[in-house]
Image: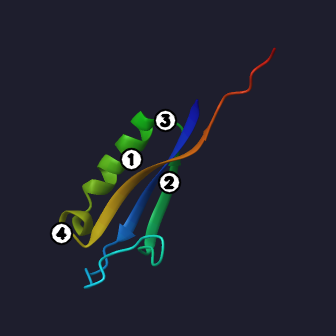
Amino acid sequence: MVTRFLVVLTDVRPLTPAGRNERVAPERRRQVVGATNREAADRIAGAFMALGMVRAGRQRVKVLAVGRRKPDQTD
């Protein structure tokens, strides 16, 4: 399987009585970076986690696996 990853830096929204629903109202994206493997995505996420706004809890870092597919097979 070939998997690509996105590293997303978002603003944290306040928790409401209804909770947080990313499908209905996603958090505002500040930065999106693509990576071709998990190790690269983790390194980028680590750099984002060192930011002051993330450390203060105002922003959040997410690593998302996208684009999963089987590699081309030649028979």
Q: Could you tell me if the residues under marks 2 and 1 are in contact, i.e. CB atoms within 8 Å? A: yes
Q: How many marks?
A: 4
Identify the residue shown where x is 31% and y is 74%.
12
Which is nearer the N-term, disc 3 or disc 1?
3
Instruction: Tell me the CA gap for discs 3 and 4.
Output: 28 Å
Q: Nearer the viewer, mark 3 or mark 2?
A: 3
Where disc 4 sits, the SS reads loop
Q: Earlier in the sequence, mark 2 or mark 4?
A: 2
Question: Where residue 33 is drawn, which disc sits there?
Answer: 2
Q: Residue at x 19, y 63 (%)?
A: 55
Spatial CA distance of label 4 from label 1 is 19 Å
Q: Residue most toward the bottom?
A: 17
Question: Which picture quadrant has residue 13?
Answer: bottom left
Tell me the quarter of the image containing the N terminus: top right
Q: Residue at x 35, y 49 (%)?
A: 45
Residue under circle 4?
56
The quarter of the image holding the C terminus is top right
Q: Position of residue 37 (x, y in %)?
A: 49, 35
